[in-house]
Image (cartoon, rainbow, N blue to C red):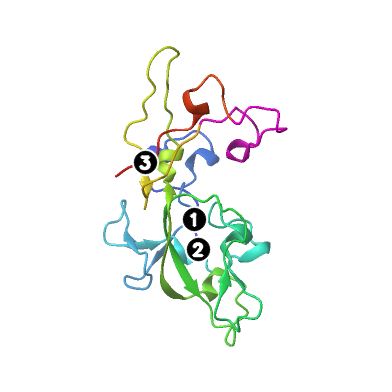
Amino acid sequence: CSAISRDPLVVSGVGLEDKRDPRGAWCYVPRGACSDQEFSVLFPSMTLSYKVCTFSRPVGPFASSGPEGFPNNGLALRKSGSQGRAYDISLNSMVALGAAYSLCWCNGTESSCSTEGDFRTRLGALHVAGPTALQRDSNMTCRTGLPCVIDHFAGHALEDGSRLVVLPADARGCLWRRASLADPMGLVDFPNLGVSEPYNK
C-alpha cells in the first residue's frame, strides 16, 4: 500500500508529510475485487482501493483510530443479557460528525473479530444526525454591532428543533460547562446567551 497521494496538487507539497494522501493508504487492485474501487487518475485503465489497506488494522480499544467521535473506536459492545440481539454503540453523549456510516457484522465463530477485515458483512447504514465534516472545518465571521447570520449551514439528517450555541473559547470545546451555579449559563454579551433559534425546515 502507498500513502502518497495521486492528486498532483497534494504531491506538489514540499516534504513527505505534505504528499500524504488525506484519505489514507491505497493500493491497486483487480477490477471488481473491492466494493470501494475507483479508477486511477494517473492510470485510467487501473482500479484502486483504500479499503484493502485497512483490513489488517485492529478494531476496538486497541485500534489507533476509528470513526471520529465514536467511543471504543466504533466497535459496538454486546448488551448484557441480550444474547447477541442488542449492542451498545455509546452509553454516553456521542459527539460524532453528521453522516451515514456503514454498520458491519463479524461472525465470531469463524474469526476473532479483531481486525477491520473480519467485519465483512454490511448490515446497512447508521445515520448520525448533525453537522457534517465540511461544516466543522468551515470558518465564519461576525462583527460587533452588526447582525450575525450563519447561512448555508450543512448537516446530515437535521430535524426541527436543532440549535446552535456559541460557547467560550476553552480547551473543552463543545464540552464546556460553567464552573459553578453562580456563573452565567452562557455568553451574557450574546442575545439569548448565545443560543440560536430552533432550526425549522
The residue under the point 60% across, 76% down is 113
Is disc 3 in contact with disc 1, using a CB cutoff of under 8 Å?
Answer: no
For mark 2, give the secondary structure: helix
Q: Which residues are magenta?
A: 166-185
For mark 1, give the secondary structure: loop
Is disc 2 in contact with disc 1, using a CB cutoff of under 8 Å?
Answer: yes
Magenta span includes 182: yes
Residue 10 horizontal/vertical position (percent): 42, 40
- Under mark 2, the amino acid is Cys
Front residue (pair 40, 144):
144
Q: Is residue 124 left or right of residue 171?
A: left
Q: CA distance from mark 3 to mark 1?
A: 39 Å
Counting residues from the start of the chain, the first of labels 2 and 3 encountered is: 2
Label 2, residues with CA under 10 Å away: few <14, some 14-19, many ≥20 = some
Front residue (pair 126, 25):
126
Which residue of the protein is positioned furthest toward the bottom in this rendering? 109
The residue that disc 3 covers is 199
Residue 31 horizontal/vertical position (percent): 32, 70
Front residue (pair 138, 36):
138
Counting residues from the start of the chain, the first of labels 3 and 1 encountered is: 1
Q: CA distance from mark 2 to mark 3?
A: 40 Å
Residue 50 horizontal/vertical position (percent): 44, 60
Q: Is residue 79 above or below residue 39?
A: below
The residue that disc 2 covers is 53
- Under mark 3, the amino acid is Tyr
Q: Is residue 180 left or right of residue 132?
A: right
Which residue of the protein is positioned furthest toward the top in this rendering? 145
Residue 13 horizontal/vertical position (percent): 46, 35
- Under mark 1, the amino acid is Ala
Q: Is residue 201 above or below residue 144?
A: below
* For discs 3 and 1, the disc positioned in front in the rendered view: 3
The residue that disc 1 covers is 25
